[in-house]
Amino acid sequence: MLNSLEALPPDPILGLSLAFQEDPRSEKIDLGVGVYRDESGDTPVMRAVKAAEKQFLEEETTKAYIPQVGVAEFNAGVLDLVLGRDHPAMVDGRASTVLTPGGTGALRIGAELIKRIKADATVWVGDPTWANHTPILKGAGVNIATFPYYDKESSTVLFSEMLEALDAASPGDAVLVHGCCHNPCGADLGIAEWRQLADLVVAKGLLPFIDLAYQGFGEGLDEDAAGVRLVAEKCPEVLIASSCSKNFGLYRERTGSLTSVAQSAEKAKAAQSHATNVARAMYSMPPAHGAFLAGMVLQQDDLRQTWQEELTAMRNRMNELRALFVRKMADKGSPRDFSFIEQQFGMFSFLGIDKERIQRLRDEFGIYMVGSSRVNIAGISETNIDHLTDSLVEVLKDG
Ligand SMILES: Cc1ncc(COP(=O)(O)O)c(C=O)c1O
């Protein structure tokens, strides 16, 4: 039977990475990869995480399963981090969370919950959105519809078009939105837009489903959660898929969580029980290591302070690189205005250049990015910025 399977083509991003690795040019630049990079191009273990890990290895006495909902310190820490201790949903005890294998696991379980609640529910996703959203939602068997989100030509969020499209949603449908640092476009909703979105969600009886994969990468831990918190205040129910991959650098440990804000404490517990029930049939028990580490970092003052300092440095680096890129492009006489890059947040932005220019950058200058022109800002450095901006100006010369 396996004989009937044909090998699938390699994932385009992984293929790009491979081509980059094989490129012998020393000045090559990888802007395709989806992980944070420091100035030397590395993705080191964060110091706070390393310190927690040392302590944890000393203290660990068993590898027996952890409770299905997760690690108490982690779950409590995540709720505080995402909603904030004083949020009405926290004060009322109307929020519950479950540990999941990464943000991806949280998204999948969230989608399964949506399907349990309404078998023919549609989940509305932005165009564009993270490339894995559609496969994850398809895996759960929900219907998928799209709303316009961002226009690459004008580099703007299509907010009124988004609201117009969502007007066609039915009660019980869910709207999947990025909490901050939109992947792939870097353009986020402002607080007034979050408010309008929340109003529409309430008026139409929709369920907000927020993907918070980059908290702390944009403007700050609290600032990046402002939209999520507002929606959780104005809407009676919310699902939040959060990830510790980027902000704790725990990528391979698969650490995330699905938070349910419900109308009562009892219903929040009920949502949690369904989430663990879904997980039980999919992978049975959650991975523990990353959750123990993130839990310790969140709960121990010294570790938390170190982590926040490290996260601030990462965020500042990305924001400074954005500003530097814009300045260099302008100084070098770029025929296009890239100032929008400085108004966006997080690890990604679209350059908004066509496929031919993307190919020229790769062939002639060793600069690699995915076909949509999405670039990883953290792949830029003080060392490679001149090669990048010189090359980009060169390929933009003919218009
Ligand atoms: C928008 C978005 N959501 C969710 C995730 C999930 O990350 P993970 O499953 O590694 O925690 C990512 C990772 O790239 C992402 O970019």
Image: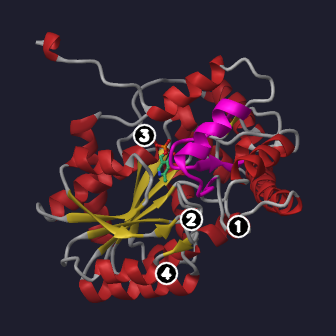
- Which numbered disc, 3 or 1, marks the residue that appears first in the sequence? 3
In percent of width and height, residue 165 lies at 30, 78
- Asked if residue 342 lies in the magenta stretch, the reply is no
Q: CA distance from mark 2 to mark 1?
A: 9 Å
C-beta proximity under 8 Å, tags 2 and 1: yes
Q: Is residue 22 visible?
A: yes
Position in image of residue 220 (x %, y %): 70, 65
Q: Earlier in the sequence, mark 4 or mark 2?
A: 2
Q: How far apart, in angstroms, are the residues tagged by discs 2 and 3? A: 20 Å
Direction from residue 315 to residue 372 in the image, left or right: left
- Residue highlighted by disc 3: 101
The residue lying at 41 percent from left, 25 percent from top is 10
**Secondary structure type for disc 1:** loop
User: In the visual, does 111 lie left or right of 86?
Assistant: left
User: How packed is label 4: few (under 14 Cα within 10 Å), some, or many (20 or more)?
Assistant: some
Question: Hey, what amino acid is under mark 3?
Answer: Pro
Disc 3 C-beta below 8 A from ligand 1? yes
Q: Please, what is the three-letter code of the amino acid marked with disc 2?
A: Cys
Residue occupying the point 58% across, 69% down:
155
Q: Residues within 10 Å of mark 1 (few under 14, many from 20)?
A: some
Tally the numbered discs: 4
Dot label at residue 180: 2
Residue under label 4: 194
Residue 373 drawn in magenta = yes
Task: Examine the image and state in which quarter residue 43 appears.
Answer: top right
Which comes sooner in the sequence, label 1 or label 4? 4
Q: Which residues are magenta?
A: 348-377
